[in-house]
C-alpha cells in the first residue's frame, strides 16, 4: 500500500507526509518489518474511524428523521392553536421577551408570532430594560390590549433577569443583538426607569392588567411623578409598594372594568389612603401588610368602608396587621354586609378575625379559611408566641355567631393552627407557659365543642388541620398539650416536620413521642404529610410503638426539672389513614442508618446481617402498613429528587392503592 493512498476518513489531508516525517527522523531505528507493522496499525485505525463515522452518520439521519416528524406534526397545527401555545410559554418575569426566541425556530413559527399582536403585549419594564427592546415589543403589539408589569428591583437581580431573558446570542439577528442589555455603570437607574415609563405611556391606557412592583426606594419617587392614569380597560391591578403608599393618586379615574385588586405593603407602613382604590366593580380583593396599624383608630372604619364600597365582592383575602387594637373606635353603627361573598381567607391573629367577624355579615354559603398561630406576619421578629387566649376568644365569637345565625357559614370553617417552637419560647418560664396553654386550651374546647345541638357538624369546626413543627430541642409532651389536642376533636390532616437540632436522632424522637403519646387525638387523620423524613424513622412512626427517648441530659425544662416518665399509647397511629404525601425524603448511606441494630430492618448476607437500604425500608413500611390497614387512595411524592425511576419502580406502589393514583 502506497503512502499516498492513506487518507483520513474525515476532512483532514493525507497522512503520507506525517508518516514520511516520522521515518526520516529515525531512519535507522525503524526496520522494513517494523514499517509494515506500523502501516497495518494505521490501516486498522483508519477502518475503525470509518466505522465510527458511519455510525455517527446513521445517528444523524435518525435524529433528522425525528426532527422532521416533529416539524410535520407542528406544521399541521392550526395557527390559532400555535398562538395559544406561544402565549402559554411566556413567563411572568420576562413577558413577551420569551417570544423573540420562538420567532426564530422556523419560518412558520416566525410568521405566526409576528402576526399575533397579543403575543407581544406582555410588557415587563424595570431599570435595566433596553429601550430599543421596549420599542420593538410595543411596535409588534400594535393596538392589542396589554399586560404591563413595572418593577423597580435591586440592581443585581434586575440585571440578571434582563440579561438572561435572551438565552443564547447566536439565536438572534444582528439587529436584535443590539437589544441585549449592557451592564450600566454610570446611568441613574431611577431616571432610566422614568424614561422607560414615558416611552410606555402610550400602551398604559390599553392595559387589561397592571402590576407595580416597587422594591427600590430610589426609583419610587419617579413613579409618583406620573400624572393620573386613564385606564378604561383595566381589569386587574396589583400593587407591591415600598416605603410609600401614595400610588392612589395615579388611579383617580373611575376604573370601570376593575375586577381584581391586590395590594401588598411589604416594606412600608400601612396607610388607610391605599383603601381609596376600592371600586364597586371589584370581585376579588387581597390586602397584605406587615407594619402595624392598630394604633390608628380610624383604620378599622376605613377598612369597613372600603369593603362596603365593593358590593360585588366574592373573594376577600386579608394577610397581616390592619385591624385596630381593642378599645373604643369610630365604627359604622350597622355591620358591613357583603351579600356576594363566597370566600374569606384571613392570615392573621385570632383576635383580628374576631374583630372582623364582629363587624361584617356574610352569606351562610360562604367559606372561611383562617391561618393563625406560629410565626405570622404580625408577630414576626417581635413576640412569636401565639396567644391561646385570642384563640379562645375566637372560639367564643364563632359560637355566638353560629347560635345567632347572623353571619357565619354552617359547613365550612377551617383553621390551620401551626404548633411550632413558639409554644415553648425562651422568652418566658416554661412552667408558666404550660399552665397558660392548659387553661386557654380547655376554654377553647368548651367554646368549640357545643352540646350536641350545634347546627355545625363536628368535623367542620376549627382544628381539622394541625401541623407539628417543633424546632427547638425542648420537651413538648405535657398535660397542656393533651388539653390542646382535646380542643380540636377531629384532626383530619397531620403534618410532621423533623426538629432542627445538632443531636443525632433527638429531633425524630421528640416527634415520635408526641405522636405516640397522643394517638387518640389523631384517630380521625386521613391525610399524613411527612416533610423530609428518613425511612427508618417512618418505620418507627407507623409500625411500632417503640419510642426511643432522648438522653436524660436533654430533658431539662426551663425550671431545671426533668420531664416525667413518658407514657406511650399502644393504639395504632392514624388508623384511618388514606392519603400520604412525602415532601422530600432522606436517603443516607446504609452505614448511617439510625436503627441499624433493629432485627426487623436487617437482612442476612454472606457477610452476616447488614442493614437494609433506605429504599427497601420504605418499601417494607408502606407494604406492611397497607397489609394492616388496607390500601391507600393516593400516594404523592413531592421534591423527592433523591428517588430515581428505578427506586420508584422497586417500591411497587400500584399494589398499595385501591385506585392507581400516584403523583
Image: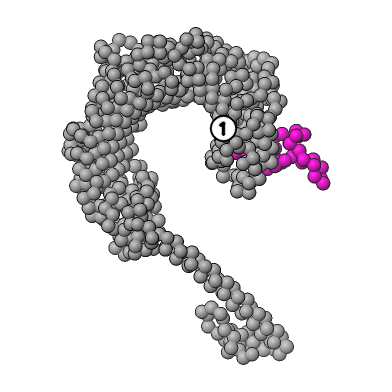
Q: Per the image, is 476 magenta? A: no
The image position of residue 564, as x and y in percent, is 67, 14
Q: Specify start and end residues of the magenta stretch as a single range.
A: 584-613
Tell me the colour scheme of the image.
one colour
Residue closest to the far front: 658
Residue 61 visible in image: yes
User: Which residue is denoted by mark 1 in the rendering?
Assistant: 579
**In front: 491, or 512?**
491
Q: Is residue 544 left or right of residue 447?
A: right
The image position of residue 133, as x and y in percent, is 28, 54
Say which element carries label 1.
strand
Task: Determine the residue positioned at 53% across, 78% down.
Answer: 10
The image position of residue 104, as x and y in percent, is 36, 61
Q: Relative to 337, is 583 above or below?
A: below
Q: Per the image, is 585 magenta? A: yes
Q: Relative to 4, is 407 above or below?
A: above
Amino acid at each position: 500500500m502506497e503512502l499516498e493512498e492513506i487518507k483520513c476518513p474525515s476532512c483532514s489531508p493525507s497522512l503520507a507526509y506525517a508518516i514520511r516525517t516520522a521515518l526520516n527522523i529515525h531512519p535507522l531505528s525503524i526496520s522494513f518489518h517494523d514499517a509494515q507493522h506500523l502501516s497495518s496499525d494505521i490501516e486498522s485505525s483508519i477502518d475503525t474511524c470509518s466505522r465510527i463515522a458511519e455510525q455517527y452518520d446513521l445517528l444523524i439521519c435518525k435524529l433528522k428523521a425525528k426532527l422532521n416528524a416533529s416539524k410535520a406534526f407542528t406544521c399541521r397545527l392550526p395557527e390559532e392553536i400555535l398562538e395559544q401555545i406561544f402565549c402559554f410559554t411566556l413567563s411572568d418575569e420576562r413577558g413577551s421577551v420569551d417570544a423573540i426566541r420562538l420567532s426564530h425556530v422556523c419560518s412558520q413559527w416566525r410568521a405566526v408570532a409576528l402576526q399575533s399582536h397579543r403575543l407581544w403585549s406582555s410588557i415587563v419594564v424595570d431599570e435595566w430594560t433596553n429601550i430599543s427592546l421596549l420599542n420593538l415589543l410595543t411596535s409588534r403589539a400594535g393596538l392589542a390590549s396589554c399586560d404591563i408589569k413595572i418593577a423597580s428591583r435591586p440592581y443585581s437581580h434586575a440585571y440578571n433577569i434582563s440579561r438572561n431573558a435572551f438565552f443564547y446570542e447566536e439565536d438572534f439577528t444582528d439587529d436584535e443583538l443590539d437589544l441585549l442589555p449592557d451592564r450600566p455603570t454610570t446611568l441613574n437607574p431611577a431616571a432610566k426607569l422614568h424614561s422607560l415609563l414615558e416611552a410606555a405611556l402610550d400602551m398604559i391606557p390599553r392595559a387589561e392588567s397592571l402590576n407595580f412592583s416597587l422594591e427600590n426606594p430610589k426609583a419610587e419617587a419617579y413613579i409618583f411623578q406620573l400624572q393620573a392614569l386613564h385606564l378604561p380597560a383595566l381589569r386587574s391591578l396589583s400593587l407591591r409598594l415600598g416605603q410609600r403608599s401614595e400610588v392612589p393618586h395615579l388611579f383617580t379615574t373611575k376604573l370601570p372594568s376593575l375586577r381584581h385588586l391586590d395590594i401588598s405593603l411589604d416594606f412600608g407602613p400601612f396607610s388607610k389612603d391605599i383603601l381609596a382604590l376600592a371600586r364597586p366593580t371589584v370581585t376579588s380583593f387581597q390586602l397584605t401588610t406587615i407594619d402595624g396599624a392598630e394604633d390608628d383608630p380610624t383604620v378599622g372604619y376605613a377598612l369597613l368602608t372600603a369593603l362596603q364600597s365593593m358590593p360585588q365582592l366574592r373573594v376577600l383575602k386579608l394577610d397581616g396587621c390592619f385591624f385596630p387594637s381593642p378599645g373604643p373606635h369610630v365604627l359604622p353603627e350597622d355591620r358591613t354586609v357583603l351579600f356576594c361573598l363566597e370566600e374569606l381567607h384571613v392570615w392573621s391573629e385570632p383576635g383580628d378575625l374576631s374583630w372582623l367577624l364582629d363587624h361584617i355579615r356574610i352569606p351562610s354559603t360562604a367559606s372561611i379559611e383562617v391561618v393563625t398561630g406560629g410565626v405570622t406576619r404580625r408577630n414576626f421578629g417581635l413576640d412569636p408566641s401565639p396567644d391561646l387566649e385570642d384563640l379562645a376568644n375566637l372560639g367564643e365569637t364563632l359560637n355566638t355567631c353560629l347560635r345567632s345565625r347572623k353571619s357565619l357559614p354552617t359547613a365550612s370553617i377551617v383553621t390551620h393552627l401551626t404548633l411550632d417552637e413558639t409554644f415553648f419560647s425562651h422568652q418566658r418560664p416554661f412552667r408558666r407557659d404550660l399552665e397558660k396553654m392548659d387553661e386557654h386550651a380547655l376554654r377553647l374546647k368548651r367554646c368549640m365543642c357545643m352540646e350536641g345541638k350545634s347546627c355545625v357538624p363536628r368535623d367542620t369546626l376549627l382544628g381539622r388541620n394541625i401541623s407539628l413543627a417543633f424546632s427547638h430541642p425542648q420537651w413538648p409532651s405535657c398535660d397542656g398539650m393533651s388539653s390542646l389536642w382535646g380542643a380540636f376533636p377531629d384532626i383530619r390532616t397531620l403534618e410532621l416536620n423533623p426538629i432542627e437540632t445538632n443531636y443525632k436522632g433527638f429531633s425524630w424522637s421528640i416527634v415520635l413521642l408526641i405522636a405516640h403519646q397522643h394517638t387518640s387525638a389523631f384517630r380521625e387523620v386521613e391525610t399524613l404529610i411527612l416533610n423530609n423524613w428518613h425511612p427508618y424513622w417512618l418505620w418507627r412512626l407507623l409500625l411500632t410503638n417503640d419510642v426511643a427517648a432522648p438522653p436524660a441530659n436533654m430533658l431539662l425544662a426551663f425550671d431545671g426539672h426533668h420531664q416525667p416518665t413518658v407514657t406511650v399509647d399502644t393504639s395504632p397511629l392514624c388508623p384511618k389513614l388514606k392519603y400520604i404525601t412525602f415532601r422530600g425524603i432522606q436517603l443516607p448511606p446504609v452505614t448511617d442508618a439510625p436503627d441499624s441494630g433493629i432485627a426487623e430492618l436487617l437482612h442476612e448476607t454472606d457477610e452476616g446481617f447488614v442493614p437494609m437500604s433506605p429504599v427497601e425500608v420504605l418499601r417494607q413500611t408502606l407494604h406492611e402498613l397497607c397489609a394492616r390497614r388496607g390500601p391507600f387512595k393516593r400516594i404523592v411524592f413531592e421534591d423527592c429528587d433523591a428517588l430515581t425511576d428505578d427506586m420508584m419502580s422497586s417500591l411497587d406502589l400500584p399494589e398499595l392503592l385501591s385506585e392507581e393514583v400516584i403523583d
